[in-house]
Image (cartoon, rainbow, N blue to C red):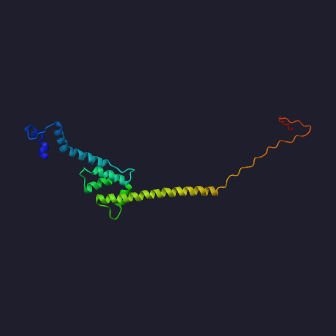
């Protein structure tokens, strides 16, 4: 096949290859040379693929789709999978006594860990919410309510007979 690729022009000129249409010729070229390009695209996609905020199941589904056609198998495939997944889950699995070895084991173990981690996170959030509610209730019970002061009546001075009321302030000189 490689000889054919190298000598395609020579074979065409010699009449060893005949195509009825240009479309048929181009389709054959894509079929022969496109595989390498497709592999390169798949490998590049695989190398930039990351889990980010997705669940492990979503990441694995995308990883499998991209890995198909990349010709990556065994160790190189596991290496790319570990590189793209969440660092926390990867570290936990690498620290176990017997870390997974095959890609299928990695898929299974990471999915379980991811599910447990997400469930744990939800429980923590619920507990935090309950604690917050409990603290608010406790604070309400501890702090006495501010009682409203009864309105004070402003008493008008009682008028004295024969004295006219004015707003003049008299300052007496002492001396």
In this view, which residue lies farthest toward the left? 14
In this view, which residue lies farthest toward the front? 20
* Residue 118 higher or lower than 18, as above or below: below
Residue 77, picture quadrant: bottom left
Report whether residue 91 is seen: no
* Residue 119 higher or lower than 173, as above or below: below
Residue at screen point 46% across, 56% down: 122
On the image, the x and y values in percent for residue 4 come to 12, 44
Report whether residue 60 is seen: yes
Image check: 30 left or right of 134? left
On the image, the x and y values in percent for residue 132 come to 55, 55
Image check: 16 left or right of 175? left
Locate the C terminus and report the quarter of the image it occupies.
top right
On the image, the x and y values in percent for residue 117 come to 42, 58
Image check: 143 left or right of 12? right
Front residue (pair 24, 174): 24
In this view, which residue lies farthest toward the right? 162
The total number of labels drawn is 0
On the image, the x and y values in percent for residue 67 come to 28, 51
Front residue (pair 37, 160): 37
């Amino acid at each position: 096949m490689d000889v054919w690729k190298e000598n395609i022009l020579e074979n065409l000129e010699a009449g060893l290859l005949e195509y009825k249409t240009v479309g048929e010729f181009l389709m054959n070229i894509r079929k022969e040379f496109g595989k390498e390009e497709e592999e390169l695209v798949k490998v590049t996609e695989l190398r930039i693929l990351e889990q980010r905020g997705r669940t492990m199941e979503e990441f694995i589904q995308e990883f499998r789709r991209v890995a198909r056609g990349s010709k990556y198998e065994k160790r190189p495939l596991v290496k790319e999978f570990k590189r793209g997944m969440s660092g926390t889950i990867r570290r936990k699995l690498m620290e176990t006594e017997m870390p997974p070895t095959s890609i299928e084991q990695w898929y299974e173990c990471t999915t379980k860990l991811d599910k447990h981690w997400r469930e744990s996170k939800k429980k923590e959030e619920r507990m935090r919410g309950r604690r917050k509610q409990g603290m608010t209730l406790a604070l309400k019970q501890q702090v006495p309510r501010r009682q409203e002061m009864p309105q004070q009546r402003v008493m008008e001075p009682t008028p004295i007979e024969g004295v006219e009321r004015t707003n003049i302030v008299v300052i007496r000189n002492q001396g």
